[in-house]
Image (tube, rainbow, N blue to C red):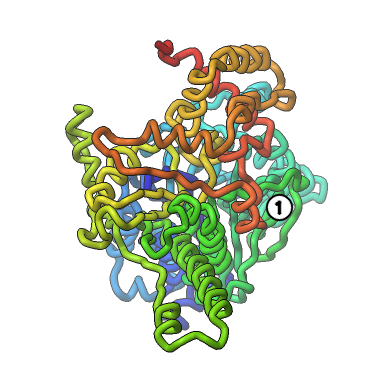
């Protein structure tokens, strides 16, 4: 499996009781902090480049710090930031640590609101300054803003211009920082609205401050900010005075879930994270709807409000296939169905030689699809047994029945993810030789020259690991055929809503389609697609059409798969190789609630997606090496 860097993970916690309540019931006021740690660890799959946490202390007096933040880089960032937090807490005496009232005023990170973030870079930018949460400071508590998000905006320049024309001067052109400034500006205006209302009522001094904090409406902030956003996002925010928000994009691309009881309110990117962390049932966890915001005021009052109308709703199907945790009840069932639906094309690839076929999978994310595939083959084999027994009728002997019923689907764990290879050697041949050892095999698991070997993976994107490692190492078993199965369709297009995927020319499906175009004398089509993309370059994004789809429409999926086999066959490997891909229809049947399939179909749900794919093709065309 080629690891994809993908969308981030978010977590928010609001404690709804005083810290003394948790000290008395759970033995520590750190109940919320501990839950945040658990929720972040349970989402570690969503971000291994960095992590950050923030805390708001609602009981701090003037002159006392009320917002805290820690951030770190690297795969061990979660442990690092929590170790740093506990190091600061550990400087207090045992008596002080068990005095919740003292902690609420004086101990860092002893607060009622927590925010956590796990980062995967979606822009190629790295460094601590890009790690969430982002913080905007102000002497007025209500004007302090901390945000984190699982998102990528397709139209950062447009958002930048939207705030620049108002006189703001952002210091960084990153989507998170620009959103922080945009939201911060709107929060200032919302605070001023409340200030004017307080003045009209004759309030003065701290009465004005309390009025502002009691009447800030973050829905107003979002309604004036979000209309310009084009992308997939779950945006979380908290003010210094304790207002919280979480908004999901109106296309429903990125997921968000929430739960509330009398003690706590939480938000997370995935449902099982909440279930496990708080020991609650799936039906108790709510999914945030597209375009909807979850809003909680400083008193703990919770409501949802539609910020933008849901439109062209396309939740990301790759969440179901690969990115989300497979422990979710629905996702696990859907991944199994993805494997089950591939039985017929696999049978065709092995020439229906089921008794001479071994089924396996590429560890580790394809395991659920593998179980579904095996169940599908068991159903197929059982039907064969029934038909054969019917044909024998009353003449079936004990030996016949024993022969028929003893047939089994053959399964083995053929491939093992041995170690995470770090290829420090840069030279091509040496690097490829190291890459070939990322996986190991179970020797003797198949009969050389007799058995077909079927291995299922969840996706094939670049094909590099397949060529340099998987096919080479499977070939050592000398199977009659190697059939590599993808439980997702051919990945043909980049994602622009939060997943760091390859440039156009790194997609094996795209390279295969381009090669077929040259093979069949269709090279002028590439020139024409480039011309049409260039003609759209300065159009408003709403008018742009994805012309790259025209390339794929010239060929069938099987033709592209066969070309891939040619391109991915390692030198010296003569074994018959087949690629079997999931179909779009099979994907939608298995994942009916997540129709977002732009990776495979090119049907981007937002105008910004069409704009970016045309830009990607222009970049490819202008930098492509001339074809000999």
Could you tell whether 477 is left or right of 567 in the image? left
Secondary structure state at the residue bearing disc 1: strand
Could you tell whether 481 is left or right of 123 in the image? left
* Residue 464 image-quadrant placement: top left
Measured from the top left, where is residue 67 in percent x and y? 48, 52
What residue is at 33 percent from the left and 63 percent from the top? 89
Q: Is residue 271 above or below residue 473?
A: below
Measured from the top left, where is residue 63 in percent x and y? 47, 51
What residue is at 71 percent from the left and 47 percent from the top? 313
Q: Nearer the viewer, residue 518 or 91?
A: 518
What residue is at 19 percent from the left and 27 percent from the top? 427
Q: Is residue 270 above or below residue 198?
A: below
Q: Is residue 332 above or below residue 498?
A: below
Q: Residue furthest right?
A: 200
Is residue 506 in view from this perspective? Answer: yes
Measured from the top left, where is residue 233 in percent x and y? 59, 44
Is residue 194 in view from this perspective? Answer: no
* Residue 79 image-quadrant placement: bottom left
What residue is at 56 percent from the left and 45 percent from the top? 144
Residue under circle 1?
292
Q: Nearer the viewer, residue 163 or 519?
A: 519
Measured from the top left, where is residue 306 in percent x and y? 76, 52
Q: Nearer the viewer, residue 342 or 273?
A: 342
Could you tell whether 227 is left or right of 123 in the image? right
Q: Residue furthest front?
A: 395
């Amino acid at each position: 499996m080629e690891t994809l860097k993908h969308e981030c993970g978010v977590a928010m916690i609001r404690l709804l009781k005083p810290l003394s309540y948790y000290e008395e019931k759970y033995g520590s006021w750190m109940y919320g902090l501990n839950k945040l740690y658990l929720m972040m660890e349970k989402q570690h799959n969503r971000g291994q480049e960095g992590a950050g946490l923030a805390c708001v202390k609602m009981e701090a007096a003037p002159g006392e710090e009320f917002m805290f933040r820690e951030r770190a880089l690297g795969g061990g960032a979660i442990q690092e930031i929590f170790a740093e937090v506990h190091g600061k807490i550990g400087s207090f005496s045992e008596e002080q640590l068990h005095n919740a009232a003292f902690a609420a005023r004086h101990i860092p990170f002893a607060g009622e609101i927590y925010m956590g973030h796990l980062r995967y870079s979606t822009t190629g930018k790295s460094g601590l300054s890009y790690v969430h949460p982002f913080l905007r400071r102000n002497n007025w508590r209500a004007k302090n803003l901390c945000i984190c998000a699982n998102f990528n905006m397709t139209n950062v320049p447009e958002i930048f211009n939207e705030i620049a024309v108002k006189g703001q001067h952002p210091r960084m052109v990153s989507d998170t920082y620009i959103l922080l400034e945009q939201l911060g500006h709107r929060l200032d205006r919302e605070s001023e609205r409340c200030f004017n209302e307080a003045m009209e009522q004759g309030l003065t001094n701290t009465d004005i401050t309390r009025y502002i904090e009691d009447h800030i409406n973050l829905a107003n902030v979002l309604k004036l900010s979000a209309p310009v956003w084009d992308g997939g996002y779950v945006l979380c925010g908290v003010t210094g005075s304790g207002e919280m928000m979480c908004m999901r994009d109106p296309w429903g691309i990125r997921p968000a879930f929430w739960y509330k009881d009398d003690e706590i309110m939480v938000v997370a990117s995935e449902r099982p994270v909440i279930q496990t962390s708080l020991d609650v049932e799936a039906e108790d966890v709510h999914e945030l709807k597209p375009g909807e915001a979850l809003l909680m005021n400083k008193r703990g009052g919770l409501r949802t409000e539609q910020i933008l109308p849901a439109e062209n709703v396309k939740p990301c199907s790759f969440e179901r296939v690969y990115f989300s945790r497979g422990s979710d009840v629905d996702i696990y069932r859907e991944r199994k169905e993805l494997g089950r639906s591939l039985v017929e094309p696999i049978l065709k690839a092995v020439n229906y030689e089921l008794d001479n076929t071994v089924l396996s999978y590429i560890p580790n994310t394809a395991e659920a699809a593998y179980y579904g595939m095996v169940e599908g083959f068991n159903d197929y084999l059982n039907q064969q047994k029934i038909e054969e027994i019917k044909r024998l009728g009353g003449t079936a002997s004990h030996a016949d029945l024993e022969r028929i019923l003893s047939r089994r689907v053959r399964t083995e764990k053929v491939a093992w993810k041995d170690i995470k290879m770090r290829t420090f050697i840069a030279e091509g041949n040496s690097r490829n030789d190291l890459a070939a050892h990322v996986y190991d095999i179970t020797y003797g698991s198949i009969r050389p020259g007799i058995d077909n070997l079927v291995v299922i993976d969840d996706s094939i994107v670049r094909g590099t690991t397949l060529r340099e490692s998987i096919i080479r190492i499977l070939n050592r078993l000398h199977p009659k055929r190697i059939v590599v199965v993808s439980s997702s369709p051919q990945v043909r297009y980049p994602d622009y809503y939060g997943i760091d995927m390859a440039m156009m020319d790194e997609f094996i499906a795209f390279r295969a389609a381009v090669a077929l175009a040259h093979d069949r004398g269709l090279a002028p089509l590439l020139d024409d697609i480039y011309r049409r993309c260039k003609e759209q370059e300065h159009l408003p994004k709403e008018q742009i059409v994805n012309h790259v789809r025209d390339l794929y429409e010239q060929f069938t999926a099987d033709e592209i798969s066969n070309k891939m086999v040619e391109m991915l066959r390692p030198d010296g490997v003569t074994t018959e190789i087949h690629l079997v891909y999931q179909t779009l229809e099979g994907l939608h049947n298995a994942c009916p609630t997540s129709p977002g399939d732009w990776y495979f179909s090119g049907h981007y749900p937002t105008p910004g997606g069409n704009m970016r794919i045309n830009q990607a093709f222009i970049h490819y065309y202008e930098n492509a090496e001339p074809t000999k």
